[in-house]
């Protein structure tokens, strides 16, 4: 049997096994509190998250299709060359950096980045609401001895005064310590996807450079940004940039970290140190690389679609747009609870998932599934 036939046959067997296990597990779970959303096939829309949930069979079938025409050239060896190498080169170009490396998770990407950038100076400034500070089980402290100093509680964006004061307090205390790195998450998921605006990034970068401090961008959801976003100008201010592969680029897992050749060489060494040198990563790399080329154009169309919907709802006089001017892909729509509940139920019956009304607003997530239907259908779901 040749390798290609083996790959495709293995994928099919894997899908069957996963589907069988999932079915068995679902039978054992209690019934959901609310009725299931009726399936509408290719017209299913997810306005409650960054992308549609994973369809294991569809993903595996798509991967099998992509492998046709590829031989051993698609396969990497311990994440070297093959589809992984091609993905790394594509992201290095996209993000305007000299080099890029594939990593299994965003947690690993963030921790490797701050360790590389801090060097011998084991202090880093972070947003308190960031993934690095809130969701990575103190990995930077426990594995690298880096002390994370949190800024901007309950906010996405630290002020220049906060950053300057934190640097000054560290450098001018009774036992002076240099801040090795500043990590900024943008968009900030815990702050409704709000982004750190470019002007603020530039101000923080200027402060950092004046003190010999380096900058990391946790840009897991960076490519979901609205049409006005200047990617080139934004990422140019950072030494390293991380982007997720599975949140909206169609991969089952994975991340990329881009930066200078020197920094990424050290990142690859740390990847092995942390146990992250997978035997092969061609599967997520192939899927993400297939999605990447047209993704920006598609997400821009999705934002335009959402803008038309929101304008129509606001024009009705029953909805107010409470979205932050620095929002990424999450809009906050203020409306009466009764209107929101009725829209949620109509959406559920039509195969359009929405978040429930909470504290006066309904969050509306922009993703590519919004393009499955014309704006008029969404307006009708809200207005009845």
Image: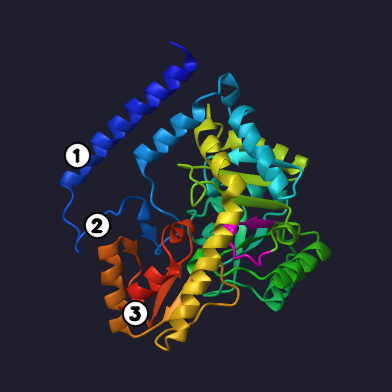
- Are there few (<14), some (14-19), or many (20+) residues within 10 Å of tag 2? few
Q: Is residue 104 above or below residue 215?
A: above
- Most extreme residue toward the top is 1
Vertical side of 244 occupied by 56: above or below = above
What's the mark number on residue 383? 3
Q: Secondary structure at mark 1?
A: helix
Tell me the residue at 43%/65% (across/down).
Answer: 374
CA distance separating discs 1 and 2: 21 Å
Q: State the residue at coordinates (60%, 65%).
A: 226
Left or right placement of residue 40 versus residue 46 in this view: left
First in sequence: mark 2 vs mark 3: 2
- Return the disc, 3 or 1, that comes first in the chain's sequence: 1
- Numbered circle sitting on residue 321: none
- Front residue of 123/349: it is 349
Q: For the residue labelled by badge 2, is the local secondary structure a helix, a strand or a loop?
A: loop
Residue picked out by circle 2:
38
Relative image position of residue 143 (x, y in whole percent): 56, 46
Quadrant of image for the C terminus: bottom left
Residue 130, x across and y down, in percent = 54, 63
In this rendering, position of residue 258 left or right of residue 25: right
The stretch of residues the image draws in magenta is 216-229
User: Is residue 218 covered in magenta?
Assistant: yes
Residue at position x 16%, y 45% from top?
A: 27
Tell me how many marks there are: 3
State if disc 3 and disc 2 touch (CB < 8 Å): no
Q: Which residue is mark 1?
A: 24
- Taking the image as shown, residue 224 lies to the left or right of residue 200, namely left
Does the rendering let one see residue 111? no
Given this view, does label 2 or label 3 mark the residue nearer the observer? Answer: 3
Alpha carbon of mark 2 to alpha carbon of mark 3: how far?
21 Å
Give the quarter of the image for residue 43: bottom left
């Amino acid at each position: 049997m040749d390798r290609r036939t083996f790959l495709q046959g293995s994928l099919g067997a894997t899908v069957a096994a996963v589907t069988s296990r999932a079915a068995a597990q679902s039978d054992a779970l209690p019934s959901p509190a609310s009725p299931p959303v009726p399936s509408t096939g290719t017209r299913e829309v997810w306005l409650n998250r960054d992308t549609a949930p994973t369809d294991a069979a569809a993903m595996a079938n798509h991967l099998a299709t992509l492998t046709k025409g590829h031989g051993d050239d698609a396969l990497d060896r311990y994440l070297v060359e093959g589809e992984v190498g091609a993905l790394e080169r594509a992201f290095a170009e996209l993000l305007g950096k000299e080099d890029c490396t594939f990593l299994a998770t965003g947690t690993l990407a963030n921790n490797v980045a701050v360790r590389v950038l801090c060097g011998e100076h084991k202090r880093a400034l972070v947003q308190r609401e960031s993934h690095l500070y809130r969701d990575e089980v103190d990995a930077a402290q426990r594995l690298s001895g880096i002390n994370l100093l949190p800024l901007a509680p309950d906010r996405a964006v630290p002020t220049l005064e906060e950053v300057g004061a934190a640097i000054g307090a560290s450098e001018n205390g009774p036992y002076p310590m240099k801040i090795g790195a500043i990590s900024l998450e943008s968009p900030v998921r815990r702050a409704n996807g709000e982004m750190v605006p470019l002007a603020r990034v530039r101000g923080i970068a200027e402060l950092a450079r004046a003190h010999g401090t380096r900058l990391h961008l946790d840009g897991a959801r960076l490519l979901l940004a609205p049409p006005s976003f200047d990617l080139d100008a934004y990422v140019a201010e950072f030494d390293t940039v991380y982007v997720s592969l599975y949140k909206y680029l169609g991969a089952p897992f994975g991340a990329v970290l881009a930066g200078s050749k020197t920094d990424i060489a050290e990142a690859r060494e740390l990847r092995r140190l942390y146990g992250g040198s997978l035997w092969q990563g061609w599967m997520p790399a192939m899927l993400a690389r297939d999605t990447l080329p047209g993704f920006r154009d598609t997400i821009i169309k999705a934002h335009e679609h959402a803008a038309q919907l929101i304008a129509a709802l606001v024009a009705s006089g029953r909805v107010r747009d409470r979205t932050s001017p620095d929002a990424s892909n999450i809009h906050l729509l203020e409306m009466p609870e009764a209107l929101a509940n009725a829209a949620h139920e109509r959406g559920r019956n039509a195969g359009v998932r929405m978040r429930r009304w909470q504290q006066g607003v309904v969050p509306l997530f922009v993703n590519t599934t919004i393009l499955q239907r014309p704006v008029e259908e969404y307006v009708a779901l809200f207005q009845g």
